[in-house]
Structure formats: structure tokens, C-alpha cells
Amino acid sequence: MCGIVGYIGGQNATPIILNGLRRLEYRGYDSAGLAVLQNGKIEIRRDAGKLDHLVTLVTNQPVEGNLGIGHTRWATHGEPNARNAHPHLGSTGEVVLVHNGIVENFLELREELEAEGEKFNSDTDSEIIVHLIEHAVAAGHSLENATRLALKQIKGAHGIVVFSSREPDKIVAARIGNAGGVVIGLGEDENYVASDIPAIVEHTRRMMFLESRQMAVITRADVKIETLEGKPVQPEIHTISWDPIAAEKGEYRHFMQKEIHEQVRSLTDTLAGRVNFDEGKVRLPHLNLTPEKALRIKQVILTACGTASYAAQVGEVLIERIARIPAKTVIASELRYNDPIIDENTVVLAISQSGETADTLAAMDECRKRGATLWSIVNAIGSQAMRVADGYISMQAGPEIGVASTKAFTAPLVDLYILAVLLADLRGVITPEQRRKLVSDLRLVPDLVGRCLDREAGVIQVAREMKYIHNMLYLGRGINMPIAFEGALKLKEISYIHAEGYAAGEMKHGPIALVDRDMPVLAIAPRDPWYEKMISQIEQARARGGGVIVVATDGDERVAALADHVFWIPETPWMLSPVVTVIPLQLFAYHIASLKGLDVDQPRNLAKSVTVE
């Protein structure tokens, strides 16, 4: 969750760090700080609250130097106050550290250090690590060896960045497990380190990514990477393709609004290079699929968290319907505890925008131990979920800054459709004519989404009427049932309105008791195989006095007669309809939250990338 930025070179580190932290605000945080080596001494500035508090502090107490690290923190141990904010300085003032993760044996180590006379200046688990490193440095170890020794004593998953005034020409960074990314940016006579790409992409697009149990020694001229056991590593250098301008709001009020409107482009990019409309064929080269490999697949388990898990549920329908392979979705936080039946004929497909979600990575690790083939759908190039998988699909959605995911939801819906068509073709379960029709339908997607976005004014009007509601029930069936879940999640995430997504067919088994004039119902009812059933659910809600909003296909007079409000969508092939039906739900949630004056991009208690369990 936490954000990290570090710099070593010829420039003043302070503005680079502050600007980098600003670009990581989307991850969520409750305090911020930085440490800079100024005239041979480590100077720290940190404060609780938003980054503006730190900027004010630095303005009033300037600090300059060519080496520094910064951090935005979500509290896990200790209250969110200045005392517990990172960076943390050792007792001698010679070693300073920022940390992502949780030290699982925190209490045990703290008791040992206190018994040795160590004094603690915070309530955090992170301070343990800086004292362990400092003790090893005092015993004569180099900073990198001291870091190595400290990391061997702590339990859990971690990402750390540390420097020492004793060795003012280097930064040491390390990663253990799935506690978030460690990205190293390569410059000219300067280098950078961060927890995510947006923090440093304005300075360099050449980047390396630390794997678990790797450590980097970063100087202004060089980067050396080794395992924690001291074995040299030759990392791959990735060139990041997107421009830093893409991470700016531009004309939009919020990143979320911008990202909703970027979906026409992101979906066009998702199709690019994968779909040959002339031949009616699709390709996913990074899966390395052959007919023989496709025929060996006996089941597909999709795993993800939050919004990505709802995309997975849509994929479950597509893979079974098109490719005729048994498929099921298991929430990543539960999968590894369920003792799943997995073997070498199982594909486990993980979906993650960041590619660094701790629960998803842990589920992948468990499934690999059981012999499964691992695939991933990720948006962050070079992320852990991409690197550990046997094959991957890149979302090609570009940077997503808003905490509430939008374009990184619709992109994998299209990716999953393409995957289902590819598997079906390789397995010989569809005819060439069926394949060409399925592929041809993909051509419509960007335009259909664009036409939904053109109707934003109608959604705003409904949002104005509904912004004071306290509860809402979302209903969907079949392939659009997960869209009901996703629509409700969006409303909860950013507007703080209690909303529940429900399988429409289950409404009479309990939720219908809640329906009255104070419980509006939003039904997703495009013309699809479940249309008649959804009409019945809408009528039941109306009969009990509930206000009804319906997502419906253009020209549907039955819905128009039943609904209080309609979010109209264009006629869409039903297996691609989730990409379209979700657009008005994204806009609806966004505009309610915006009209209420809420912090849309950084909703309370949430972070973009959940890198601890």
C-alpha cells in the first residue's frame, strides 16, 4: 500500500522525492516523510496527514542534498501521526529506512532489542529493521551486508529502502515476498528507486524490477543486484512505453473521471495486435498456447480480489460458454486456504491491475506448488504477477491512478473474451464461421463504449436525484450478475452509500424484504438470454414500492414503462455486454460521489494496491 521514492545523483533530491510521492498519492496513505543527506548528516522531515503538510514543513525547514528517500504510509502498527511516519532513523543517526510490509515477529524482536538497551522512537514495526541494520553497521558490516543480516531476522513480506551517512554514495533496496514492488529507474549519472512506476517515469523509462529475495545496491553511476544469499543477478531492463503526461488529469476534475473516459482508447489498445479482423482470428502470444496445450486443460480456476474478481466471474461464463472448459472463480484471499483440487491439467488465471496484490500472489504461489499452469492478466508491466506466471496477458490500459478501478476492469473483460475464443479455436470446439462472428463482434466494442459515454448527461441527472440515498440494491443475472456486484462496489467505494449486488434470481429468497420506497433498485436488463427473467424482477420491485433504475437496450419500451429512470445502452452482443453495461454504473457512482464533494480518487480507508494481507 505505502509509497516509496528514492534518488541518488547530481540533482537536489527533495523536489524529486516530493513530486514522486505526489504521483503515488493514489495508493492511499495517512502520513508522509522524507530523509535527505545534507552536508553529511541525515535530515528528516515528516508529518501526519496529506502530502501538503510535508510540503509546508519542507518549505519552512528546507533540506537539500543529492541523496534521499521518501515515503507515504498507511498505518499498520502505531497510530497515523508524525511520530510513526516514515522514514525511521536509527539511534546513532547514521542509518535511515523506509519500509512496506509487516514485520510478523515484531514483538519478539522489539523485546530482544529493548532488553539490550535499545530505545524506540515510534510504535511501528518498521523501526525494528533500522535498529537491526544499525547494529550490524556498528559491528563493521557494510550497509548491504548489514541489510542482508537484518532481513534474515525478520518474518513476513517486505520492501525496504535504506541509506547510511557512513556510506554516502549508495542506496540499498531489497524485497522479500509480496509486500509490494521495488522498481529501479536508470538515469544518466543518476538513479532512482520507487514502489511503483508513476513515481519516477517522468525521469526515466528504463526500469528494473526486484524479485523476492533480491537486493540492489544503487549508486549514481551503477546498479548492482544480488540475491539475499549474495549471488549476482542479471536483471532484465524494461522500457516503459507510456508517457508521464498520461498520469495527469488534464481537462478532468478527477483521475477516475479521466479513466472512465479513456476506456474507448484503452479498449482499442486492448484489441491492437491481438485481433485480425480480416482473418477472423485472435492471438495472445505471451501465453505460448498450442492446440496440444489447449487440449490438455481440464479446468480453469480464475482468482483475483475486489473488482478484478468480478471480471473473473464474467470470464468464468465466457470460458465455459465459448471454450467449453469447466471454469470457476475463487477469491484469492480464500483460494490457498481451501485445499483446492489442482493438478498439471489445471490453469490458474490470476487477474490484478497492479500485479502486486498480496493475496493474489500468495494464491498463485500455492497453485504452483500443486502443479498448476499459471497465467495472469495484469496492467503493470514487469509486475510480480506477470513475472512469476508461465504466461500473461497485458491489459494495455495504461496507468490507472484512481483507487476505484474502471478501465482496468473493462480491459480484462475483453482479454478474457479473446482468451475464450482462442481456447475454443485451438480445441476445435467452434467452427471457423462461429469464430469469425465472435471476432467480428469485438470490432464494435470501442464504439459501443463511446456511445455510452456520450450519454453521461443523463446519468448526471439521475445522480442529482439520488445523491442523498442511504441504501441501494443492484440486481443482475447470467453474465451481468458480476456487473451488479461491481456497480454496487463502485457506489460503496467512493460515495460511502451502502449498496449490495445480488443475483436477481435470488431476490425472492431474502433481499425482496428490504425493497420499499427507501430502497431503490438498479437492475441490469439488456436484451440477453436472461432478459425475460430480469423483467420479472423489475416488476416485483415495482410492486413493492421500490424506485427502479434500469440499464436497458435502446428502444426497449417494456423497460421504459416500468422504470423510474433508464440508463440506455446501444444494442450489444450479449457475451460482450458487461463491457457496456458497466459504463453507466461507473459514471453513476462517480457523479454521486463528486456531487457529494467526496475525495473520489482517494476514498477513505482504501488504497490502490493492497500489498499486505
Image (spheres, rainbow, N blue to C red):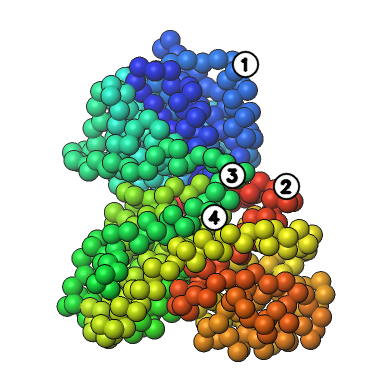
Tell me the residue that label 4 is attached to: 260
Q: Residues within 10 Å of mark 3 (few under 14, many from 20)?
A: few
Disc 3 to disc 4, how far (Cα)? Answer: 10 Å
Q: Nearer the N terminus, badge 3 or badge 1?
A: 1
For marks 3 and 1, give the one nearer the viewer.
Answer: 3
Disc 3 to disc 2, how far (Cα)? Answer: 15 Å
For marks 3 and 2, give the one nearer the viewer.
Answer: 3
Please indicate, yes or no, whether residue 369 appears anywhere in the rendered image: no
Q: Look at 43% across and 21% down and name the residue there.
A: 13
Q: Nearer the N terminus, badge 2 or badge 1?
A: 1
Percent x, y for residue 514? 76, 78
Tell me the residue that label 1 is attached to: 60
Question: Looking at the rendered structure, which numbered label has been put on residue 597?
Answer: 2
Tell me the residue that label 3 is attached to: 252
The reply to whether dot 1 and dot 4 touch (C-beta < 8 Å) is: no
For marks 2 and 1, give the one nearer the viewer.
Answer: 2
Q: Look at 51% across and 87% down and name the residue there.
A: 529
Disc 2 to disc 1, how far (Cα)? Answer: 30 Å
Q: Amino acid at mark 1?
A: Asn
Q: Look at 61% across and 89% down and name the residue there.
A: 533
Q: Foreground: 395 or 175?
A: 395
Q: Is residue 558 above or below residue 576?
A: below
For marks 4 and 2, give the one nearer the viewer.
Answer: 4
Percent x, y for residue 102? 48, 46
